[in-house]
Image (cartoon, rainbow, N blue to C red):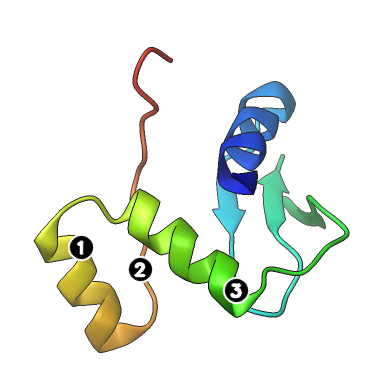
Amino acid sequence: MRIKKLLKQMVETQASDLFLRTLAFPRFRINGKVQTADPEPISSDEMTAITTFLLDNDERKQFFAQNLDIDFIHVEPGA
């Protein structure tokens, strides 16, 4: 799954934020500047898979469904 690759890249590049939007390129904020993280846009199906993976509790899922936008912290197990 590409999200795991992006999360690993975030750690390696010391990115503070990851921005994901359907049909747009994933972007990182590094040292206050936003830059493209991957040259391939996020498909609708991929975004569904990513949100299912990251929104691991009902409160987050409900908030995202209502707002189609969400900010949160994700900690990878073992990281």
Residue at coordinates 70% horizontally, 32% vertically from top-left? 9
* Amino acid on which disc 3 is placed: Arg
Name above or below for residue 7 compared with residue 48.
above
* N-terminal label among 1 and 2: 1
**Residue 59, position as x, y percentages in the image:** 11, 63
Residue 10 locus on image (x, y percent)? 64, 34
Q: How many marks?
A: 3
Give the mark nearer the N terminus: 3 vs 1: 3
**Label 1 neighbour load within 10 Å: few <14, some 14-19, many 20+:** some
Alpha-carbon span between mark 1 and mark 2: 8 Å
Residue 60: give its label.
1
Q: Residue type at mark 1: give it.
A: Arg
Helix, strand or loop under label 2 = loop
| Residue farthest along the bottom direction in this orientation | 66
In front here: 21 or 32?
21
Number of the label disc, if any, that sits on residue 21: 3
> What amino acid is labelled 2 in the image?
Ile
| In the rendered image, the vertical position of residue 17 relative to residue 75, given as above or below | below
Q: CA distance from mark 3 to mark 1?
A: 17 Å
Nearer the viewer's eye, disc 1 or disc 2?
1
- What residue is drawn where x is 62% and y is 25%? 11
Q: Farthest residue in the top direction? A: 78
Residue of label 2: 70
Q: The C terminus is located in which quarter?
A: top left
Q: Pointer 2: residues within 10 angstroms few (<14), some, or many (20+)?
A: few
